[in-house]
Amino acid sequence: MRYKTSYKYLFLVWWVITTLLFLMPPDQLPELNKILSIEKHDKIIHIIIFFVYSYLIYKISFKTYIAFIASLIFVLAYAIIIELLQPFVNRGFDLYDYVASIVGVLITYFSIYLYKLIKLIIK
C-alpha cells in the first residue's frame, strides 16, 4: 500500500512539470528546444509523456474496470484540455499532438495487458 503513495507523489510531480512545460510559451523554452530538438520530435515526446501518465494512473488506481475507464477518460480529457489551452500561450492547437497523446495511452494499456497475459501463460 505504501508504494501507491509514492506513485501518487510521482504522478503529481510529473503532472505539475509537464503541465508547466505544455503551457509555457515557446520563446521561454529556447534552450530546451535546442537540447531536445522538440520541433522534430514533439510527437514522440507526447507519446512518452502520456505513456508515463497512463502508467502512473494505472499504478495508483484500483484495478477494476471502472477505474480503468475513469483513468482513460481522465488522461484523454487532460490531453485535449492542454491542446485547447495552448493557443492562449502563443502555442497552437495541434490535432496530431492529441493523436500522439492517445497513442501513448494505448501503448501503456496494451503493454500492461500483454504483460499480464504473458505472466498468466508462464504460470
Image: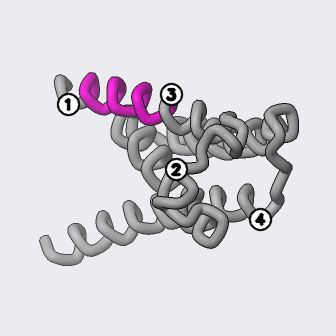
Mark 3–mark 2 distance (CA, rounded to whole Å): 20 Å
Amino acid on which the number 1 mark rests in the picture: Tyr
What is the crowding at mark 3: few (fewer than 14 residues within 10 Å), some, or many (at least 20)? few
Residue 79: give x, y in percent of width and height.
69, 44
**Residue located at (60% from left, 49% from top):** 30
Mark 4–mark 2 distance (CA, rounded to whole Å): 24 Å
- Which residue does the numbered mark 4 point to in the structure image? 96
Horizontal side of 32 relative to 88 (left or right) equals left
- Which residue does the numbered mark 3 point to in the structure image? 16
Horizontal side of 92 relative to 71 (left or right) equals right
Colouring rule applied to residues: one colour
- Which residue does the numbered mark 1 point to in the structure image? 3
* Residue 67: mark in rendering: none
Sequence-wise, which precedes: disc 2 or disc 1?
1
Sequence-wise, which precedes: disc 3 or disc 2?
3
107 drawn magenta: no
Residue 120: give x, y in percent of width and height.
23, 69
Quarter residue 45 falls in: bottom right
Magenta residue span: 4-15
Kindly state the secondary structure of the residue where label 3 is placed.
helix
- Which residue does the numbered mark 2 point to in the structure image? 31
Q: Quick check: 38 above or below 117?
A: above
Quarter residue 91 falls in: top right
**Residue located at (82% from left, 57% from top):** 94
**Which mark is in front, 4 or 2?**
2
**Which mark is in front, 1 or 4?**
4
**Which mark is in front, 2 or 1?**
2
Kindly state the secondary structure of the residue where label 4 is placed.
helix
**Which mark is in front, 3 or 1?**
3
Q: Quick check: 123 above or below 90?
A: below
